[in-house]
Image (cartoon, grey):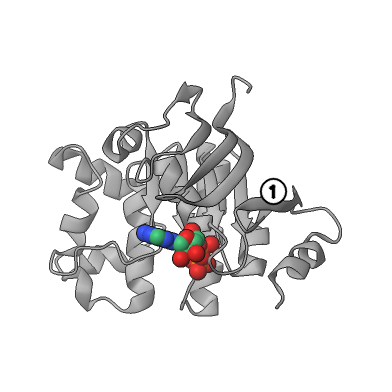
Amino acid sequence: MTAQSVIDVSGLYSGYGEAMVVKGIDLTLHRGEAVALLGKNGMGKSTLLKTLMGYIRPAQGDIRLFGEPVGGVAPNRIARKDVAYIPQEKALFQDLTVKENLKLALMRDRDFAPGFAQIEGLFPFLAQRLEQKAGTLSGGEQKMLLVARALIRRPKLILIDEITEGMQPSVVERLCTILTHEREAHGTSMLIVEQHLDFALAVANRYAVLELGEIATSGETTQTGASANVARYLSL
Ligand SMILES: Nc1ncnc2c1ncn2[C@@H]1O[C@H](COP(=O)(O)OP(=O)(O)OP(=O)(O)O)[C@@H](O)[C@H]1O
Ligand SMILES: [Mg+2]
């Protein structure tokens, strides 16, 4: 562990009941880094994120966030450490407005105006739709709202689980620009679970591939052959 490390996981096991899904993972993420977590379906990617967020108690091993041990700490307390989580399953309140959904990420109502002012430029469609019910946004817009809700708190760490699923290419590209900007401008750290290989490698500086709950390979995304190395593990 170093002073700059945001996530420090060592020897982590977690799963459901007796069934271990994450099996002995070591992972470090430094300030301003984005790590792409790749792997086929059912390899334990979402389980790892849920364990980091406190939704699943680790069976064994150590998790530190910003140097502090957080194994077994509740999700709301982890969120308060400036950690934002975008889960894989739909997480918007469909019957609440866009504005109400954004406010849920904030501690106080009065944080909305300054928070929204910071992200408005990144999500131009949102300003006209603040009073619209989230459930009536298009699928792509709902995904962008999830990202906006994560960013409005200006988190230090963002955990993102398969955000590009069902997004059209131009929106994926826009999202790549937004996350890259966030990281460069504010030193935000990101752990990004993805199936979209090109997006993952463009946004992240490092990658790791999960296979049956273990890290099968990892490296720097800019290394020659990174894409081919990952593709070997993702192909059927
Ligand atoms: N609540 C649960 N109870 C029991 N088993 C579960 C539960 N959630 C997930 N699993 C199992 O854990 C394994 C890993 O699931 P996980 O959702 O972590 O995979 P994943 O890598 O995120 O896959 P995908 O790419 O499909 O999202 C799977 O075999 C899954 O069936
Ligand atoms: Mg998953």
Which quarter of the image is occupied by the N terminus? top right
- Residue at image location 29% in from the left, 61% down from the top: 91
Q: Can you name the residue that lies furthest to the top here? A: 3
Say whether residue 120 is visible.
Answer: no
Position of residue 82 in the picture relative to residue 129 (left or right): right
SS for callout 1: strand
**Which amino acid is tagged 1?**
Arg
Say whether residue 3 is visible.
Answer: yes
Tell me: residue 21, above or below residue 227: above
Instruction: Give x and y (percent) for residue 14.
Output: 48, 45
Camera-nearest residue between 175 and 205:
205
Which quarter of the image is occupied by the C terminus? bottom right
Q: Quadrant of residue 216?
A: bottom right
- Residue at image location 42% in from the left, 31% down from the top: 71
- Residue at image location 59% in from the left, 19% down from the top: 3
Camera-nearest residue between 137 and 131:
137
- Residue at image location 33% in from the left, 42% down from the top: 153
Tell me: residue 96, above or below residue 191: below
Task: Say which residue label 1 marks.
Answer: 206
Instruction: Give x and y (percent) for residue 85.
Output: 39, 49
Tell me: residue 203, above or below residue 33: below
Instruction: Give x and y (percent) for residue 191.
Output: 54, 48
Camera-nearest residue between 221 and 65:
65
Camera-nearest residue between 205 and 91:
91
Position of residue 145 in the picture relative to residue 52 (left or right): left
